[in-house]
Amino acid sequence: MATAIAMVPRPVSGFLQTVTDETIDQMAARMLSLKVNGLADKAGYELVDTARKECVKARTGIAKEHKELKEESLRQCQLLDSEKRRLTAKVEQIEVYLEAELQAVKLEQERIQKEKDDAAYAIRLQLLTAAGGSLPEELIRSMSEHKFNTAVEEATVATQKRKEAEARAAEEEAERKRVAAEQAEANRLEAAKLAAERAEFAKQQEKEAAERKRLQAIEDEQRAKERAELEAIRAEQAKAAAALKAESDRLAKIEADRLTAEDQKRREAEAAERARVETEERITREAAVAEQNRIAQEAADKRALELRPAKAKLNEFANTVMNLDVPSGLSDFAEYQVQIALNVAAETIRKIGANLS
């Protein structure tokens, strides 16, 4: 037995009982006249902050009751969806049975038509093959009787022409092979003649190479003797140069040691003076930086105090955005997307307030 699901619409205005319009009007009457008279008005600041906390409490109470009522509405929607699926399934069972009956008739009609088409195709294929023709099966099946007869005639003519062409090609191939054989014999005789000429040329090349090798050996022996004499002269010159360099190096080291000692004393004096000057400059810089940091900190503290009310307003506005009511009539997924967008917007507003400087 089907279960009836009744949905009783609730009025949009005044359906929340946690905080009423009357409560909000009373809060507005008490709070909208509150002010903070400058940085020194600590009492005024405390009153405004206490009122703000009361607003936060009221707003979170509204959000909590809204969430509970929204969950109840979602459960009602889920019941409606379940009933729709149950009734639809029963109707679909009947529809599937009726479609099966119609499909059985359609399949039998298609089977009979296919047998006729296959028999006609087999006859056409036999005629076309006998004529030496060939066409795709799909084309053979779809051609009209006139076009098919024309295709058979054209295939017969084409087959005859092809046979004649094959006969001519066979005659031409035989002639080509005869000419190729004659050319091959001529090429063989020419190759034999060239081989004899290459053998004679190679023999002459060997004789010339042997003569060049003998002359090269004589030349190499003369060059070796000249290199030995040149190396002996260079060795004597190197020995004299080494002795001269040793004496020059000894004198250069004595002078370098003297200059190094003088340069070391000069560098030590310059380093001591630089260290003194750098110490005085560092002390002066550190004092200036400390003074700049003190002034910057005082300015930052003052700016932070001035921005505190603006940051509080942005945070409250972010909470308001996050708890805005999602429009009715949306699907569950669309409603979820809208709520996510509100949460992202609220988080962005909070970051803007946190980054105020």
Image: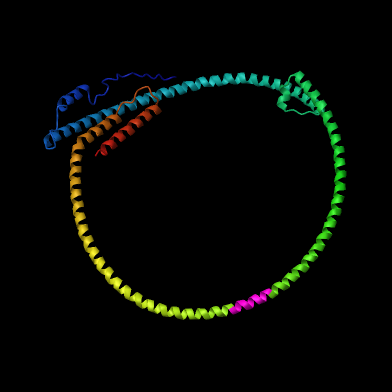
Reply above or below: 50 against 107: below
- Which secondary structure dominates the residues rendered in magenta? helix
Check the picture and name the quadrant holding the N terminus. top left
| Residue at figure coordinates x 30%, y 74% from the top left | 261
Residue 99 painted magenta: no
| Residue 292 placement, left or right of 152 | left
State which quadrant residue 108 falls in. top right
Q: Is residue 324 above or below residue 183?
A: above
Residue 17 position, x and y percent, is: 24, 24
For the image shown, how many numbered marks are present on the structure? Answer: 0
23 and 347: which is toward the camera: 347
Q: Nearer the viewer, residue 103 or 47?
A: 47
Where is residue 357? Give x, y as percent.
24, 39
Whether residue 220 is in magenta: the answer is yes
Q: What residue do we see at 29% from left, 37% from top?
A: 351
- Where is residue 66 drawn, in percent x and y? 29, 27
On the picture, is 64 further left or further right than 39? right
On the rendered structure, is 56 left or right of 90? Answer: left
The type of colouring in the image is: rainbow
Q: Measuring from the top left, give residue 169's x and y in whole percent.
A: 84, 36
Q: Which residues are magenta?
A: 219-229
**Measuring 40% from the left and 28% from the top, which residue is drawn there?**
333
